[in-house]
Amino acid sequence: MDHDDPLRAFVRALPKAELHVHLEGSIPPELALVLAARHGVRLPGGEGGVQGVRAAFRFVDFRRFIEVYLALSRCLRTVTDVREVVVALAERVAAQGVVHAEVTFTPMTHMTRGVPADALIEGLVEGRARAAELGVSLMFVPDIVRGFADQAAPTLDFALALRRRDDGAVAGLGLAGPEGDEHPLGPVLDVFARARAEGLRSLPHAGEFLGPPSVRAAMDELVADRIGHGVRVIEDATLVAELAARQIPLEVCPSSNVALGVVAALGDHPLPRLIAAGVAVSLATDDPALFGVDLVDEYLRCAGAFGWGADELRGLAEASLRHASAGPDDRAAWLAAAAAVPGPNRFIGDMP
Ligand SMILES: [Zn+2]
């Protein structure tokens, strides 16, 4: 297939980082069916086999999204389940030229169902080791769900336990779920401060379903090192300029934004305006199994919508590597490898 599309081959060959992907939203339909059968979980569309699940996964509305997401979450119970899901993600991203992925994972969703933290940790660690064999550096972002403030401290405890078990496995502490006045940040600020004191990065979602005030709070109150989405900052030119000056990167997931109605259509996405304003951005998939998208698709869709060529796509790939939570030596090596990838002309009829 790459023979027919030099730009796709080029994007695939570029070393890239995937900085915003949820483990629970990455489970492919084939594996979801195996896990569901193992545990007697009813998956939406499951009676129709892989095709049925694939159709049910195709995003319809937010309620369906949550229904599918929670059904997938119920499939994760044992060390083996977690390992298999991590390995499936690693295999999938490795095939797209991803050298580093930061994987959000919501431990309390599983622990409140009675899954022991040790089983989750062991599955993540075993999956991470297998990913390394595939050439993919994986780090995890245990995240707190907004509105469940009582789960914030246990989520940090989980992150620290995971790091004790596998130094380097944790990128930082995440925050996801519905933004809104009904879920003020107050109760989680303390936990984020403790996480930063422990050397974890602050990696919250913000500026997805709410506008500039949510981004402002992520920047100033959570002291974000990077922001998941953040795209609605575009509604405040002053804040855009500040974000650019401070170079706090955004993890931009265009297909997710379209699917969830954050923007009406890809062509309306603020990404080109954010780049023009000097904001640091990279591309990511968010929930690839649910949005039917992989990272290479995401690059190519943006190229199509915004008239981008190889230079713009190379710039985004390099930005993703610079924004990674990995150490400076890893980032430098990946950037050198990216710089060595020739332009797309090289790929015309020339791929193995
Ligand atoms: Zn997300």
Image (tube, rainbow, N blue to C red):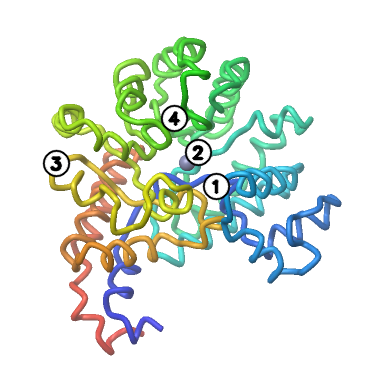
Looking at numbered disc 3 in the image, what kind of residue is underneath it?
Gly
Kindly indicate the quadrant of the structure image that contains residue 223.
top left
Q: Which residue is mark 3?
A: 278
In the image, residue 271 lies at what x, y percent? 25, 49
Real-space Cα separation, disc 2 to disc 3, in angstroms: 28 Å
Indicate which disc, 4 or 2, sits on the residue closer to the N terminus.
Answer: 2
Do the CB atoms of the residues marked 4 and 2 lie less than 8 Å apart? Answer: no
Q: Which residue is mark 1?
A: 128
Do the CB atoms of the residues marked 3 and 1 lie less than 8 Å apart? Answer: no
Q: Residue furthest bottom?
A: 349
Q: Which residue is mark 4?
A: 172
In the image, residue 190 lies at what x, y percent? 46, 10
> Eyeballing the image, is 43 above or below 304?
above
At a point 18% along the width and 47% down the height, the residue shown is 273
Real-space Cα separation, disc 1 to disc 4, in angstroms: 16 Å
Q: In this rendering, which labeled residue sits more in front, label 2 or label 3?
A: 3
Q: Which secondary structure, mark 1? A: helix
Q: Which mark is residue 140?
A: 2
Q: In this rendering, which labeled residue sits more in front, label 4 or label 3?
A: 3
Q: Which secondary structure, mark 2? A: strand
> Eyeballing the image, is 44 above or below 324?
below
In the image, residue 256 lies at what x, y percent? 44, 51
Kindly indicate the quadrant of the structure image that contains residue 58.
bottom right
Nearest the viewer among 181 and 203 is 181
Nearest the viewer among 101 and 189 is 189
Real-space Cα separation, disc 4 to disc 3, in angstroms: 25 Å
User: For disc 3, does the CB lie below 8 Å from ligand 1?
Assistant: no
